[in-house]
Image (tube, rainbow, N blue to C red):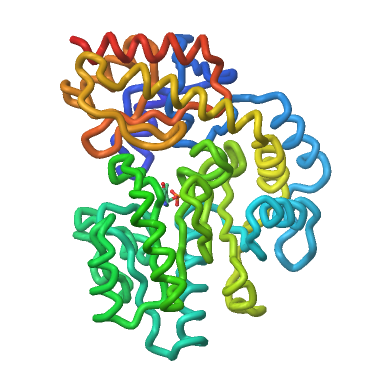
Amino acid sequence: MMTKDIDKEFIANTYARFPLTLVEGKGSLVYDEGGKEYIDLGTGIAVNTFGIGDEEWIAAVTAQLGKIQHTSNLYFSEPCANLAKLLCERTGMKKVFFSNSGAEANECAIKAARKYGADKKGEEYTTVITLKNSFHGRTITTLAATGQDTFHQDFKPLTGGFVYAEPNSMADIERLCAENKCCAVMFEVVQGEGGVNALDKDYLAALAEFAEKNDILLIADEVQIGNGRSGELYGYMTYGITPDIVSTAKGLAGGLPIGATLLGEKVKDTYTPGLHGSTFGGNPISCAAAINVISRLDGDMLAGVKERSKYIFDELNGAEGVLSVSGLGLMIGVETVRPAADVISECMERGVLVIKAKNKVRMLPALNIPMDKLKIAINTFKEVCRK
Ligand SMILES: *Cc1c(COP(=O)(O)O)cnc(C)c1O
């Protein structure tokens, strides 16, 4: 039986998978069951930060694997403490809660914001404003936070206490804050699943000012754009704002499950023992992997992200068959004349993996993808778009 047949019979029917089974890889090259080679511009949805099987990353992971694989949060753990210290030093945030996924990182952020609102402004100050077209996860609460009706339909009743603002409209934020008792605004600086749209600089600056004045927390969902992908360590840094809470996951550990919620000055003491927890959260292997990833996201690595990003934007802006290019750093959305699904499957046939975001083709290459491989992939993509 082929993997795809076993999967079809035994895996819950939640994914519309591409007809492809990936079995191994190295760097930005991956191989299917038949040994066919692909240049990977998807990195497992922005997870494999340095591609497949990066030597330094493997060394960090296996060293920790040889020591202890799990401790539980009943005890102190070295990689967990050191990763939190590193993240705080690099961001100016004050404390970190570790979990296992983006949705959980957001759940922690939402719980912290609600407790802050209730403690500071009064019991009923628990409404969280999120943006239309956002994506924050698949749990019942993060689905409620997600500002897209299509995700809500089948799962009502969802968690209450979320209202949705039009992206880039301060008027909408002000209206919702007047109509509701709000504790926070949650946003992605680049909406990923919503179509790779970056928020306006002026909007985020005005939002930050409004939030400061009204004691509304800013929660940056950096699950996808975070960890170097924007060209800065976190995407909000390219906007010059300082969120009160930052959630991240996907690329943080370079291919192992992790979620992190970074708590700033205002909320650093909001949680007290017993209020939140996770069995696997802060897992030593994941944390050792993340220490390797974060410590390598230095000036040189980030300059490399910007350089690759500029190359892709320059190549695709105005290219035949390309209608628009959006995004930031190495999180790029391309609107094509041909339907995105056709472009994606033809690229796959020709050995290039790209993914979808709404009606766009999305590219999320490894931050250190070799330029020669990137050039081949972009040329193939352009040829496919031209048809
Ligand atoms: C992927 C994603 C999530 C959900 O992360 P999971 O690890 O799948 O739970 C949340 N927010 C954003 C912005 C994402 O891109």
Q: Quadrant of residue 38?
A: top left
**Residue at 69% in and 48% down:** 287
Instruction: Tell me: residue 237, above or below residue 265.
Output: above
Q: How many marks?
A: 0
| Percent of width and height locating residue 211 | 42, 71
| Nearer to us in this view, 173 or 162 | 173
| Nearer to us in this view, 197 or 46 | 197
Looking at the image, which residue sits at the far bottom? 122
Instruction: Tell me: residue 116, above or below residue 60.
Output: below
Q: Is residue 265 visible?
A: yes
| Percent of width and height locating residue 205 | 41, 58
The image quadrant where one finds the C terminus is top left
- Report the side of 43 relative to 6 (left or right): right
| Percent of width and height locating residue 182 | 36, 78
**Residue at 31% in and 71% down:** 162
Q: Is residue 1 visible?
A: no
Instruction: Tell me: residue 86, above or below residue 227.
Output: below
